[in-house]
Image (tube, rainbow, N blue to C red):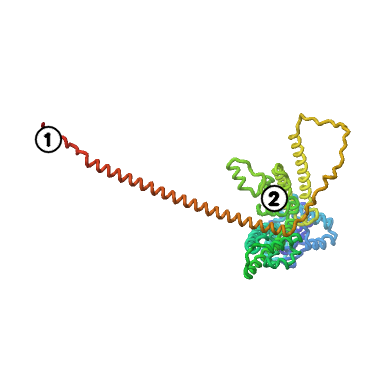
Amino acid sequence: MLVLYETAMGYCLFKLSDSAKLESADLYKNFETPEKATKLLKLKALHRFTSTANAVEDLTAVQEGKLGKGLKKFLTEQVVEKAKRKETLVVVDPKLAHSISKKLSIQVTSPSPPEDHSDLWRGIRSQIATLLDGLDPKDLATMSLGLSHSLSRFKLKFSPNKVDTMIVQAIALLDDLDKEINIYSMRVKEWYGWHFPEMGKIIVDNLAYAKVVRTMGFRTNAATTSFETILPEDLEAVLKAAAEISMGTEISDTDIQHIHALCDQVISITAYRAQLAEYLRNRMNAVAPNLTALVGDLVGARLISHAGSLLSLAKHPASTVQILGAEKALFRALKTKHDTPKYGLIYHASLIGQAPPKLKGKMARMVATKAALSIRVDALTDADGKSEETAPSIGLENRAKLESRLRALEHQNDLSGVRRFADKNQQPQRFEMKGQTQTYNAAADAVDLVPTQRDPLELAVKAVLDVKEEKRKAKEEKRSKKKADKEKKAKEESDDDHMDVEEENVSKDKKRKRRESEVNGSEAPKVGEYMLSPPQLN
């Protein structure tokens, strides 16, 4: 029986002298002294690692239960080519044992619980310096320390969990870019609107607006500028007609230079936003293919970002996935004892968006259930499984089931509505042949032809009139606001004057009462005056 053992120096292949002792309970006694250990195990072959990178590569494969290049070459030379296939090979890892027996057709045994042969591996580790004759324990400790550092650094560098960090940062940056594009586009329209206010009514798209301003410059150049790569023909004709009758103010060359610089910012940020969206789509298809197939790349990325990582999201139940992103509404509802929210970030999925309002809650619950299953499959599948063409099969199947279920619910809802509004007592009329015939009324087809496309000048005039109407309404609102402020101020001043008058009247009343009390007090007799004065005789 052969024993395979991995060390920091390389792979060791030992010959077990007595295979019966492997199952004995006192196996540890054979490793109490170096003499007993060398009597039980003898070194047959040693495969040294040529470099640290080679050692890291081979040991990483062993930890994942795979047969590395170095180990495969070593076993082929020592076992397969030397006709030792009949001997049993003892390996510590069951996955590695399965890989060796599958690829090299060697009889490999591994304990189902690894604790069964723990005394063997513990004894080899304690007596490794004796079994490998001529090895200094200090050198082995130094090699083990260096290899452990390199292996830890490799795991941190190529950790599969770090891919989630890229998705979290990408979706956060995508939201920031959307805000920046909106702010810059609004500033461009407000700034250039002083020169050509009608253009905001004609061109609604932010990117097309910035490109037109960058290409045209002053509105007087509209007649000689070609916009065929930016706008369709009908919109280009309307823009040129509106530029001739525009009521905007004139601006200087310095102003148009700064406006052009801002337009360049809008165009460049929009182009980078498109690249970032494509990068995020590819990342989501590589990391979470089933979740992407079910709810889309943006919704899936926001769910992963909110949970922190794909593995953390996989630990959430379907009920939590359903309301993820609506925590404030949930706790507010629990505090006020109202109805809890039915959906959070998952509301933006296309399956829920295309559902009627009455079925959105039910559809959100079903989508969250299937999304929880897809997330767990994506989180627990290795990188090789995700790169296959059949990787998003579960997500596609669940999406097809949910779409068919949605159609069934809509059909059932339509039938219930028909039954609800139908008159149960009304019987259908019986068909009878009356002998009357009707002819086709050709005169009804003689209608005036309506032009399918309006005149560009008419649309330009309409845009100018709309701008005038908006300015008139803005002036009226400003005027009414000023009038209201004046009235409010006058009312406050009148209230203050009225209060001053009332205070003055009160103070006058107090002074008058004080004077009257003083006068009455001087005229009244003093106490005991009638008793002290002598009586008057007639």
- Which residue is identified by label 2? 348
Q: Based on the displayed image, in which of its 4 quarters is residue 58 positioned? A: bottom right
The answer to whether any part of residue 165 appears in the image is: no
Residue furthest to the left? 537
The answer to whether any part of residue 114 appears in the image is: yes
Q: CA distance from mark 1 to mark 2?
A: 112 Å
Residue density around tag 2, few if under 14, some if 14–19, many if 20 or more, within 10 Å: some
**Which numbered disc, 1 or 2, marks the residue that appears first in the sequence?**
2
Depth check, front residue: 391 or 220: 220
Depth check, front residue: 314 or 449: 449
Task: Indicate the secondary structure of the residue bearing disc 1.
Answer: loop
Instruction: Note whether 24 is above or below 184 in the view shown.
Output: above
- Which residue is identified by label 1? 534
- Left or right position of 376 against 73: left
Residue 5's spot in the image, x, y percent?
74, 59
For the C terminus, the image quarter is top left
